[in-house]
Amino acid sequence: MNAVRRILQQHRPAKRVFARLLSDQSTCRVGVVGVPFEKGQRNTGVSRGPEVLRAAGVIQDLSSFGCDVKDYGDVKYEVVPAGKQLSNMREYDDFAACMEKVSSSVKQVLSDGRLCLSLGGDHSMGVGTIDGHYQAKGDLAVLWIDAHADINTSATSPTGNLHGMPVALLVKELADYWPYLPNMDWQVPMLSIKNIAYIGLRSVDEYERLILEKFGVTAYAMEDVERLGVHEVTQRALEAINPNGERSLHVSFDIDSLDPLEAPSTGTTERGGLSLREGVHIMETVFASGTLGAMDLVEVNPLIGSEKDVKITVDAARQVVRAGFGYKRRGMPPLLKQEIPGYQKAD
Ligand SMILES: NC(=[NH2+])NCCC[C@H](N)C(=O)O
Ligand SMILES: [Mn+2]
Ligand SMILES: [Mn+2]
């Protein structure tokens, strides 16, 4: 044994002091739900988001720094035709059927005592994930990180794409603006529009703008990020929607919030977006708040762009996700799982 090793041996107890105990990391039990749904918009490929994110190692990323991750698999659904055509809501039957399942999967993960990470899929899945979160935890705060406000109703949507409508379906203040929605009786709009904050906006439709103004929604557009800086914006957003930290926080992260240079493989790119560093900073701030209950990572489309574009986009998604669940860029101390008395890996 050489001198260095002998010294290390002698100092072994010190290692325990500096290592993180897995049992301290209460926030680090995570359940992953895949939502291979793409009918909320018109590009083929978003439904392969969960597959490419898993293949790139999203789950290993989290377990590598100590999260206890369980993969709940992909959501499956069977369509029940509504029997009635709904105007300006494309692929409505599939949407209604899929989101009911998404909601119960997310509810299950949270009831199992885990944080929930939902991998999309297009952003219409926010209806399912936030509904499930609400059912498990009650009153929520929602941070919607997006280039778009996704708060169109069927009456205001210029496209009929459901991924532009999830927020309007979730909030009680807009309930009267919808027709009766068949097969959506499981979903009661319970969220208060006051408890939603946006970061990253730069493509807001006229009627969306009207709604945001009318209800005084907390909305930090790109110019606010420029003026105040990403840290201040994130702090203010969290303060506005969750002043006492009592509400469970839902973060819905649309990858198109990032600049297309950082995330090119997505269906509705808008230039002039958040840098990856800003996206990571938002999620680090979210983690530090200790309030995260569930996160969605949506709109990664591996069929858009070159192979390199897809890799850049998927890598960006991975960095944003791991930051939300506690990864620190400054580095993580080692984990000593086995040395915790009575430590048992959860199922
Ligand atoms: N999740 C998204 N990428 N949404 C884009 C929405 C674009 C537009 N506002 C629409 O209603 O269709
Ligand atoms: Mn979106
Ligand atoms: Mn978007």
Image: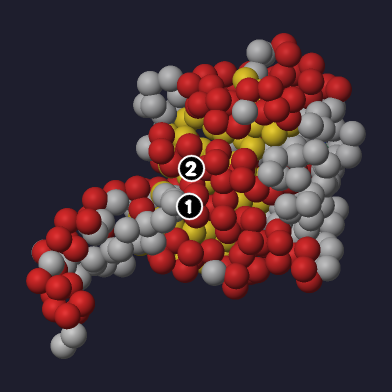
Q: Can residue 302 be seen in this view?
A: no
Residue in the picture at 24% in, 51% down:
24
Residue 310 in view of the camera:
yes
Closest to the observer, 16 or 116: 16
Residue 185 vs residue 329, the one in the foreground: 329
Q: Earlier in the sequence, mark 1 or mark 2?
A: 2
- Residue 190 picture quarter: top right
In this view, the residue in front, 120 or 39, is 120
Q: Which colour scheme is used?
A: secondary structure
Residue found at the far bottom of this picture = 1
Looking at the rendering, which quadrant does residue 176 occupy? top right
Label 1 crowd bin: few (<14), some (14–19), many (20+), radius 10 Å: few
For the residues labelled 1 and 2, say whether their Cβ atoms are less than 8 Å apart: yes
**Disc 2 element:** helix
Q: Residue at x 82, y 47 (%)?
A: 269
Q: Which residue lies at the image location 23% right of the left edge and 66% below the top edge?
A: 336
- Residue that protrudes farthest toward the front in the picture: 3
In x, y percent, where is residue 16?
17, 61
Q: Is residue 338 left or right of residue 231?
A: left
Q: Check disc 1 and give the amino acid type.
A: Arg
Disc 2: residue Cβ within 8 A of ligand 2's nearest atom:
no
Vertical comparison of 293 with 69: above or below: above
Question: Could you say which disc has been placed on residue 329 in the image?
Answer: 1
**Residue under numbered circle 2:** 284
